[in-house]
């Protein structure tokens, strides 16, 4: 299983350091087949020792240049970071990242050989229209995306389940993952949206779920490691 922690705009450099110390203590007994990813905010990127992969929540598709407020490959190289989240619904919504922009970013980081966790997800209004509309919406988020990229991991995150405390049901996850798995040629597929210690076992036992992308419940090293060790 893959367990990925997305801190979003939470944690400082110091609290990230403390977090990683605690995580390393707790994950000493993790199963070797499980892998852990940590995505701290950009200001907390660094070289950290531990049994996990450090990734960036975002970067601009350039090595360096005049892109005020952004970081590029040069800044990631400093810490040996080769993993990136692309297409998160919060960036699509609040940072107005269109499918075209997302696809350009994907192609750029693919060319750089990055491992990409590519996020897709539908809003509530689409879910309420039924499964066919959901799949149509989700598949459109693969426009311009090379689903055959060998370092691709997809994360299905229904927007209405993100940060709401209300995860999708087992049935919703199961049917959506089954259909998505076919569409992405069986690439690893994570579920995200209110995954937490209380529901982790239920979610990871669903066929077609290869792991989770966790926001809120990842902010505490104790709660996140409990999920990894579940
Ligand atoms: P959540 O966030 O776990 O707080 O719902 C998940 C995500 O946005 O990756």
Image: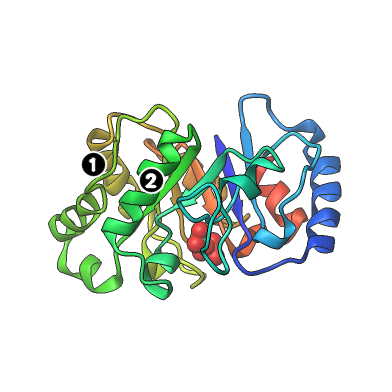
Mark sitting on residue 106:
2
List x then y, in percent, for residue 190.
45, 44
List x then y, in percent, for residue 209.
42, 40
Of 128 and 183, nearer the camera is 183
List x then y, in percent, for residue 58.
52, 56
Distance from disc 1 to disc 2, alpha carbons, whole Å, reads: 22 Å
* Residue ID at (42%, 71%): 95
The correct choice, above or below, for 72 with respect to 68 in the image is above
List x then y, in percent, for residue 105.
39, 50
Of badges 1 and 2, the one in the foreground is 2
* Residue ID at (15%, 54%): 136
Q: Secondary structure at mark 1?
A: helix
Of 200 and 21, nearer the camera is 21
For label 2, the crowd category at 10 Å Cα-Cα, with few meaning under 14, some 14 to 19 and many 20 or more, is many
The correct choice, above or below, for 25 with respect to 129 in the image is above
Q: Quadrant of residue 12?
A: bottom right
Identify the image quadrant of the N terminus.
top right
Is tag 1's residue or tag 2's residue first in the polypeptide sequence?
A: 2
- Residue 194 in view (yes/no): no
* Residue ID at (38%, 36%): 207
Identify the image quadrant of the C terminus.
top right
Q: Which residue in the protein does label 1 denote?
A: 179
């Amino acid at each position: 299983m893959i367990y990925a922690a997305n801190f979003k705009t939470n944690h400082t450099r110091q609290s990230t350091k403390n977090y990683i110390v605690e995580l390393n203590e707790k994950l000493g007994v993790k199963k070797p087949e499980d892998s852990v990813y940590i995505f701290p905010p950009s200001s907390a990127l660094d070289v950290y020792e531990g049994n996990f992969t450090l990734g960036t929540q975002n970067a601009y598709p350039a090595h360096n240049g005049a892109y005020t407020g952004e970081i590029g490959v040069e800044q990631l190289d400093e810490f040996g970071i080769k993993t990136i989240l692309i297409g998160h619904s919060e960036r699509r919504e609040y940072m107005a990242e269109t499918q075209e922009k997302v696809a350009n970013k994907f192609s750029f980081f693919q060319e750089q050989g990055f491992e990409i966790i590519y996020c897709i997800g539908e809003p509530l209004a689409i879910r309420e229209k039924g499964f066919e509309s959901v799949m149509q919406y989700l598949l459109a988020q693969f426009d311009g995306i090379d689903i055959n990229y060998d370092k691709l991991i997809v994360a299905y995150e229904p927007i209405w389940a993100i940060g709401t405390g209300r995860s999708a049901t087992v049935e919703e996850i199961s049917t959506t993952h089954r259909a998505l798995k076919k569409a992405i040629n069986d690439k690893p597929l994570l579920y995200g949206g209110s995954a937490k210690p209380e529901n982790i076992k239920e979610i990871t036992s669903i066929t077609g779920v290869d792991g989770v992308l966790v926001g809120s419940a990842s902010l505490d090293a104790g709660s996140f490691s409990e999920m990894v060790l579940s």
